[in-house]
Amino acid sequence: MSERRWSLVTLLVATVAFVVVAAVFIPWHPVPGGTPAPVPESEVFTRAQIARANAYSDTARHLAWASLAVSLLVSVVLGLTPIGRRLAGRLRGWWWVRVLLALTALAVVGRLATLTFAIVGHHRSVEYGLSTQHWGSWTVDVLKGLLLSVVISGLVLIVLVGAARRFPRAWPAVAGALLGTLVMAASFVYPVLVEPAFNHFTPLRHGPLRTHILQLAHREDVRLEDVLVADASRRTTTLNAYVSGFGGTRRVVLYDNVLKDLPRDQILSIVAHELGHAHQDDVLVGSVLGALATGLGVGLLGLAVSVRGGPGGMRDPTVVPLVLALVAIATVLSSPVNSGLSRLIETRADVASLEATRDPAAFIRVQRQLDLHSLSDDPPHWSHIWFGSHPTTLERIAIAEQLAPGMGVSWDPAAMRGH
């Protein structure tokens, strides 16, 4: 088969597999009785709280949009015009060295182009009390993030170009399979290789809270060897928890400021949400979907490169700027799908938390605290559809209020929404 046909086959196989996995494992109707409308913002937060959140989040959102637009513009100019190809063509060395040099140069240019937005964003986070990180530490994290991006993207590009050089026609299928495997491997090792570069983790100390968490894990049928605490307070005052990895690397992590700032019932509500992810193997499912989406993307890339890739096609390292531009465009265009699937999964974890703790009051209180600590506001609907990975706070509170009467608990919505 021709290269174009291999691209079509790869695209079709990955797309069908993605749809099947999503149809089976994504909770399309996660809330019993249907998802309710969000509660009114004015009934959950005071005017002062709403004004402060809007003052921070409106500007932060516009900074993020501007940064994304500039980043996309730089990628398009370098990738879809002769500029990037000419720059990459001046590099010398083995093909894989040229790939890495071209990637590094473009990554640095992209980072510099958006650095002003990042600096302003960090300054405002410090000004509003969300960040505790000084400029030196922040700069180190920016450089770590850049290095991590170059390493990951470098592996992807070497696989793509290497597969095309070794299998001139069948490279889309070969690269799609290899990169899908790489996605799965990266998700597995991420908690033990990457996360420690940004935070220090310690086991949650023995005591009543640890005992309650282990009991909660048993109730949700989750095998939990340990709960880790991240020293996030040296960077931020926001509250968070997450589950990462799967199989032998799966871990539930709490920010240390969660332990400092929240009472036990609210901590258990957060942990129950993360255990809901673990019970459903959401990280594993997300990794499989990511691997299949990567194969789908490689198929599309093969079709695009056959049109715009130049004489050498994917085999020529000068194709790197084009690949990065196409990936940037595809990432933005696919965001509504990725965000929509993520919101469904997060909603199911919210329901699991409520069903496991049977404490909607604690759930609502902790959602308010998470919102107040992060200064989140009620975003524009289109922005939430495009970029929102979680239900909004107002949606989550509405879900808790809808499920509360069936839990047999004393329930006063006005008190639970109290300012």
Image (cartoon, grey):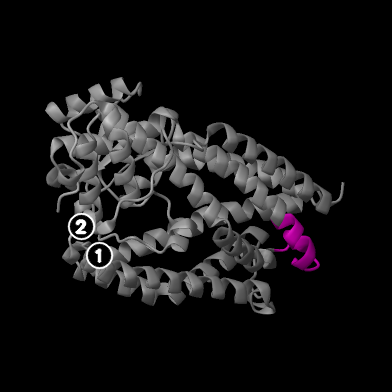
Query: How far across and down, in percent of the image, does residue 208 sit?
Result: 12, 27
Q: Disc 2 on helix, strand or loop?
A: loop
Q: Is residue 49 left or right of residue 354?
A: left
Give the mark toward the camera: 1 or 2.
Answer: 2
Query: How far across and down, in percent of the image, does residue 398 sit?
Result: 32, 45
Look at the image and tell me whether residue 182 can be seen: no
User: Could you tell me if the residues under marks 1 and 2 are in contact, i.e. CB atoms within 8 Å?
Assistant: yes
Give the quadrant of residue 201: top left
Task: Give, as a three-letter code, the residue at label 2.
Answer: Phe
Q: Is residue 315 magenta?
A: yes
Residue ID for mark 1: 53
Q: Disc 1 on helix, strand or loop?
A: helix
Q: Is residue 179 left or right of residue 416?
A: right
Task: Give, as a three-letter code, the residue at label 1.
Answer: Ala
Q: Is residue 127 above or below residue 19?
A: below
Q: Nearer the viewer, residue 133 or 214?
A: 214
What stretch of residues is rendered in magenta?
301-316
Query: How far across and down, in percent of the image, does residue 157 sit?
Result: 62, 56
Could you tell me which residue is drawn at 50 percent across and 73 percent down? 69
Q: Nearer the viewer, residue 229 or 419?
A: 419
Could you tell me which residue is drawn at 75 percent across and 53 percent down? 165
Q: Is residue 207 left or right of residue 121?
A: left
Q: Is residue 117 magenta?
A: no
Mark count = 2
Residue ID for mark 2: 45
